[in-house]
Image (cartoon, rainbow, N blue to C red):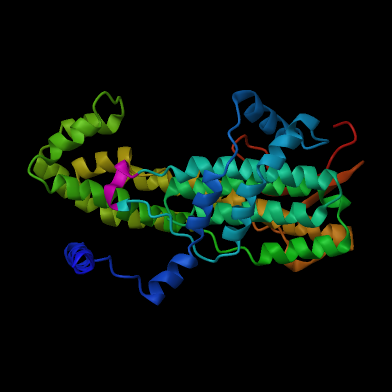
Amino acid sequence: MCRISAVLAILGVILIAPAAAPAESPAEEAALAKNAALMYWSAFALLPRLDEDQQAAVQKSLDALGPMDKKLIPVVESSAPSLKELHRAAKLPSCVWGTALDEGINAMMPHLSKVRELSRLACLRAQLRFEQGQAAGAIEDATAVMVLGRHAGSDGLLISVLVDYALERQAIRLVAAYLPRLQPDALGTLSRKLDALPAGKTMQQAILQEKEVYLGWFIRELAKEDGKERLLRLFEGSDDPAVAVIKGLSLAQLRKSATDLRTFYDKLASLALLPPEKVKQAEADLMKNPGLDGPAANLARTLVPAVFAARQAEAAQQVQVAMLRVAIAVAQHGQQALSGKEYRDPFGDGPFKYAAFDGGFELSSKLMDRQGKPASLTVGRRSTE
């Protein structure tokens, strides 16, 4: 009798227990398994905790790019579990971070700071491996950072794409410093790794994404009865000129103006396709005559992204990647590789400028950087460094 009571009791628990959540479909499970973001988050969770002195030492080492301070070797060793996950993620073609883009300017993107931290440690290990003659491992680390950059920019937002550029620039500078030491097989591997990089987002795509995410959010907020008040609360304490514009407009004016900005964003995005030297004037002309009524024109001048700065950053990134490819070709075939049509300066009318020095060479583009100097890449290290 007791046994029967026990069985009935167990059955009762089973019957009243909440139903288990439905299992994910095979297609959903397969999609999750191919999402690099899940592995990156594992990498973030396994990052070693560095104090301020260690962080400064890591950055100093990456800036100097030479023999590493032995005190940093334990940092590299403690990074191994995290970097293992980095490499797993870098083998996957897609990356969806799950950012709540519908929240507009309130969307949280904590992964971007972690991405930077992870990339620094990967570059640090690559530096150590280069110094130890482990070129294959160093190339794996450096190119994984470049993949991480492309994945970081996968949501297409301007800030995310700029983070991509920063990571790739760091990895390219590192690889270039050690390029003259690489053997032919390592140079071939590096070239193939560059060819296999996932496509990055363009600045035109980023501007259009800003339209959907940020302007779209702005419009949705204004559709609410207390839309203007909600926006002003968000900008409380801000001295941004945009806030003064918002305060001076009625809710109806704000709604119409924000909606009118959709077509203006499309015009901005088209400017990002122009050569960098033409964007600045084209942007100034568009801002002077935006084709919008007064309130909408004021919003356009204060809220939309700066296209010239965005295009300039994109062009700088494009030329860095192009110069790395040329540097590999020169290392493989000598200076005559510069005459190949496939290695021309994308922002000039001929090959990159080449200047040899004791320990390497420097490539320069016709593209000007923010300081008004030719964009350049130093390959190898000068003997005085």
Looking at the picture, how far across and down is residue 3, in whole percent? 23, 67
The residue lying toward the viewer, choosing from 322 and 150, is: 150
Residue farthest along the right direction in this orientation: 358
Q: Give the magenta part as a residue range.
A: 102-107
The residue lying toward the viewer, choosing from 338 and 15, is: 15
In the rendered image, which quarter is residue 193 located in? bottom right
Residue 103 inside the magenta-drawn segment: yes
* Screen quadrant of the C terminus: top right
Looking at the picture, how far across and down is residue 185, in whole percent? 85, 64
233 sits left or right of 199 in the view: left
* Screen quadrant of the N terminus: bottom left
Is 248 drawn above or below residue 125 in the view shown? above
The residue lying toward the viewer, choosing from 31 and 119, is: 31
Looking at the picture, how far across and down is residue 292, in whole percent? 23, 49
**Can residue 375 be seen here?**
no
Please report the residue visible at 25 percent of the width from the left and 49 percent of the height from the top.
217
338 sits left or right of 102 in the view: right
Please report the residue visible at 16 percent of the width from the left and 36 percent of the height from the top.
230
Q: How many marks?
A: 0
Residue farthest along the front direction in this orientation: 1
Is 21 drawn above or below residue 239 in the view shown? below
Residue 141 inside the magenta-drawn segment: no
Residue farthest along the left direction in this orientation: 225
